[in-house]
Amino acid sequence: MRYIFITGGVVSSLGKGIFAASLGKLLQARGYRVTLQKFDPYLNVDPGTLNPYEHGEVFVTHDGAETDMDLGHYERFLNILTSRDHNVTTGKIYQTIIERERRGEYLGKTVQVIPHVTDEIKRRFTLLSQKEPYDVIITELGGTVGDIESLPYIEAARQLHYELGPLRVLFVHLTLLVYLEATQETKTKPTQHSVKELQQAGVQPDVLVCRTSRPIPKEMRAKIALHTNVPKNAVIQALDVPLIYQVLFQLRKEKLDEVILRRLRLPLRGEPDLSQWATFVERLQNPQATVRIGLVGKYVELHDAYKSIHEALMHAGGWQSVRVEVEWIHSADLTPENAERRLLGLQGILVAPGFGERGIAGKILAIQYARTRGVPFLGICLGMQMAVVEFARHVLGWTEAHTTEIDPSTPYPVIDLMPEQRHLRDKGGTMRLGAYPCEIRKGTLAWKVYQAPLIYERHRHRYEVNNQYRSTLEEAGLVVSGRYPEKDLVEIVELRGHPFFIGVQFHPEFQSRVEVPHPLFKAFVEAAARHTPD
């Protein structure tokens, strides 16, 4: 078992998650069993209660963990399943330690950062290796070197390196080469200082990956190597690229995988097979058609809030040689006066998930437009619930129909809180989370999409379609085409007679992969490509 630790320096948001996933894919393509994990330095137990503007998307794993969005990159790139053990926060670390202290497990000793916190971090570093026979575990350490909150993780990684030896633990430091437009110079000093910060914590990076907008001259690589004690062949250039899917080709060109495997004394096992990935990128870069899809949500200023949805659209479009142009539409900005102007010309409308009242009216307007104009529609989670509300209001005439999440006193609670959720007080980790089975009804659009009687999809919600109104909705033309058999809960609805109108209670975007796009997104993009807008 080998451990690779990835740290970041100079600035945040360098793309450690994409880099880690790309490196993992390269090693996987050489035949190694690889997994990735993310350690986040914040004190929240998980990101489930964080505002999307604070953190971006919350990625939900198959086993129901609310995790960092980088786990989505890991799953999409490597086509693997992650779990609650793949994402650890400082909140989780301290929660575990405090619970042990309260139970008296430290036998009266003073509980300290060293050794107790670092020991728990090391236990978490190696936990995955006790469950599966991986060859390599890549660990991304969140934050930037020099942050106070990151210090215990750096120290724990240093200790693991000391305990297991340099042939089993390797450090990769991702940094930024700063380009000054005024002088047209690339500066290496911030990178040098970043490495010195790491060295002062007792860690010497084995590989230095330099993000840059300009190619690095040979002399500059030699200078960086000299000042950081990193071998010249391990100073890796990471040029900016138009698509995140091209990063691994850049790293392969730099022979990063070879440098790492040789450093860990692992065989190269021939050239990595990236042919399918190359085909996908080729089709994505050279599309035969373009389709405009409106993504209607309440957090669209931060595109990372809908990262998995956006990537799922890219996967579906790429394999069909279609460029998906996403029109980001803030649902709070849609009004009866401007909705038609804002939505005109779209070939598909996707109403995104979310929580709370803000932007609800705009989502309903977008759904009404899609339903009445025959525009292909996909509603996810709250988007599906609002499709039910819109149908109840404008087809059945129940103008006050609503979800009790927004209007607890509505006379037509077509969307209501699940009974087991009504007495909960804690918000974190208490929703319906993770993969559940869904039974597909034959002869429906959902059946045509999935071609299977039973599927498993991931959930993150508290409210459900109220079965009290189900038969009336179906009689009027809103078909229930998927349900959770154990509790007879509505999972999928679709509109009879519409070219493509489907809403799902689950989150299909979490299971889309670069090489295996999700069938629902494939069908949606295909329907949008066929649609001729007004």
Image (tube, rainbow, N blue to C red):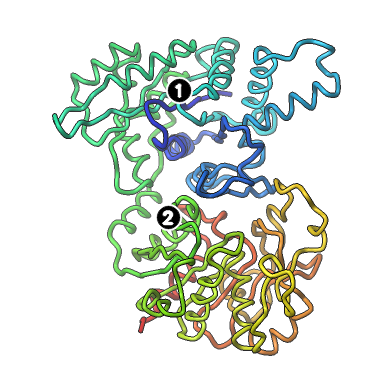
Given residues 493 and 456, the one toward you in this image is: 493
Question: Where does the C terminus fall, quadrant-wise?
Answer: bottom left
Residue 39 seen in render: no
Callout 1–callout 2 Cβ contact below 8 Å: no
Q: CA distance from mark 1 to mark 2?
A: 28 Å
Q: Secondary structure at mark 1?
A: loop
Question: Residue 290 location, x and y as percent?
Answer: 32, 68
Horizontal arrangement in the rendering, residue 53 relative to residue 273 (left or right): right
Horizontal arrangement in the rendering, residue 315 relative to residue 485 (left or right): left
If you read the primary sequence from the N terminus, does the residue marked by circle 1 or circle 2 appear first?
1
Question: Residue 446 location, x and y as percent?
Answer: 60, 74
Given residues 4 and 260, the one toward you in this image is: 4
Q: Secondary structure at mark 2?
A: loop
Horizontal arrangement in the rendering, residue 482 relative to residue 320 (left or right): right
Residue 353 seen in render: yes
> Label 2 amino acid?
Glu
What mark, if any, has residue 301 been given in the picture? 2
Residue located 51% across and 42% down the image: 70
Q: Nearer the viewer, mark 1 or mark 2?
A: 2
Question: Residue 160 location, x and y as percent?
Answer: 59, 15
Q: Dot 1 surroundings within 10 Å: few (below 14), some, or many (20 or more)?
A: many
Residue located 15% across and 32% down the image: 182
Question: Where does the N terminus fall, quadrant-wise?
Answer: top right
> Label 1 amino acid?
Val
Question: Residue 125 location, x and y as percent?
Answer: 62, 25
Residue beneath label 1, please?
Answer: 145
